[in-house]
Image (cartoon, helix red, strand yellow):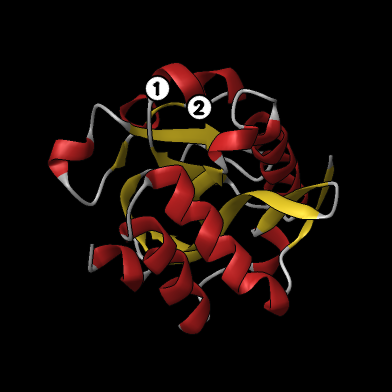
Amino acid sequence: MFLRRETTADAPALHAVHSAAFNGTVEPNLVDELRAEGDLLNPLSLVAVIDGEIVGHVAGSRATLNGDKGIAVGVGPLGVLPSAQREGVGSALMHAFNAAADALGYGVAVLLGDPKYYSRFGYVLSSVHGIVPPQAEWAQHFQVRTLAGYNSDMRGNFRYAPAFERL
């Protein structure tokens, strides 16, 4: 497996990965909109390639924490082709994402997902760090991972890029 940054030419394959992984249109359209609006962060939009085929993708997007830009990053969606699931692709992408976000100086990485899955990557419920999800009903699945740029003042209202608001 080879991990690398997304390229412009990857867009159709990434749309197909998210369509297959989620059996729908919300996630692939979200990634397309983030890319079109300039909110997909290329250093944090990573693909997994096996035998020349893109089999997985994790998106990193612009976000704000209490209106401040550049201290928080949105994670997701994370998608893996069904034929490549349970092969370590998602884990490899998440480890690479966290390392890259850390190296880029972000304070927190934030996602909405299954705590049983994401806790293995250091994510905890956002309430632990005083970070408030955009939707109150997300609280049981809204998670944060602190990174090297974190300090305890990083708390308050989190907002994803505008494409998330339209879901």
Q: Is residue 92 toward the left or the right of residue 157 in the image?
A: right
**Is 146 positioned to the left or the right of 53 in the image?**
left
* Residue pointed to by mark 2: 123
Residue 152, image x and y in percent? 49, 36
105 shown above or below 35: above
Asked if labels 2 and 1 touch by Cβ distance under 8 angstroms, the answer is yes
Between 61 and 64, which is closer to the camera in this rendering?
Answer: 61
- Viewer-proximal residue among 49 and 108: 49
At horizontal 76% and vertical 54% (from top left) the residue drawn is: 53
Which amino acid, mark 1?
Pro
For image coordinates 58% across by 46% down, the residue present is 107
Q: In the image, what residue type sits under mark 2?
A: Tyr
Whole-angstrom CA distance, mark 1 to mark 2, is: 8 Å
Report the quarter where the C terminus lies: bottom left
Does the image show residue 43? yes
Helix, strand or loop for disc 1: helix
Residue 160 image position (x, y, % from top left): 37, 60
What residue is drawn where x is 57% and y is 23%?
Answer: 122
Q: Is residue 124 above or below residue 44?
A: above
Q: Which mark is residue 115?
A: 1
